[in-house]
Amino acid sequence: MECTINWLPATGMAFAAETASGHLLMMDGAPDGGGRNLAPRPMETVLAGTGACTAYDVVLILKRGRHDVRGCQVKVTSERATSDPKVFTKIHMHFTVTGHGLANAVVERAVRMSHDKYCSASIMLGKTAEITTGFEVLAG
């Protein structure tokens, strides 16, 4: 896996990342660091990518188990160290999974499997951060 990141000097502190799959991702810094708040911060993209990685796993695990999953939302909250490097120290992921006939135990298992085995992003961040999860199941 690879990507190329280019600084866009005319924007202050914005960067364009081109992924190996040919997609573009924009990032920008905060105004107090020379950015113009035109795009997410790089660390926000790390957090968003981690949430998407684990949500992907949960949906895939449920679909492979032939469960009628119809929606999955993950709200990710975090805390960071106060001094450099400002790594994530705590991350909480709350899943809201919607489906027809989904048992709590099935969703709990999918979340646990992602957290413990499949989501490389959260497992990697777990080296510096305490990661906790919660979930709720909604009929739909």
Image (cartoon, rainbow, N blue to C red):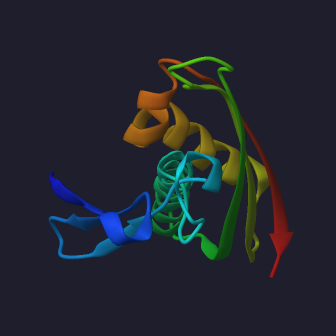
Task: Give the residue displayed 60% in from the left and 53% down from the top.
Answer: 30
Residue 98 left/right relative to 59 = right
Camera-nearest residue between 134 and 61: 134
Camera-nearest residue between 12 and 76: 12
Residue 118 left/right relative to 6 = right
Task: Give the residue displayed 56% in from the left and 46% down from the top.
Answer: 33
Task: Give the residue displayed 52% in from the left and 70% down from the top.
Answer: 66
Residue 55 left/right relative to 70 = left
Q: Is residue 33 above or below residue 89?
A: below
> Can you give x and y, in whole percent of width and height, for residue 129 in the image?
59, 22
Camera-nearest residue between 92 and 138: 92
Q: Is residue 62 above or below residue 87?
A: below
> Can you give x and y, in whole percent of width and height, for residue 105 in the image?
73, 47
> Can you give x and y, in whole percent of width and height, for residue 77 in the image?
74, 44
- Quarter containing the C terminus: bottom right
- In terms of image quadrants, where is residue 68? bottom right
Task: Give the residue displayed 61% in from the left and 45% down from the top.
Answer: 111
> Can you give x and y, in whole percent of width and height, for residue 73 in the image?
69, 66
Camera-nearest residue between 67 and 118: 118
* Tally of marks: 0
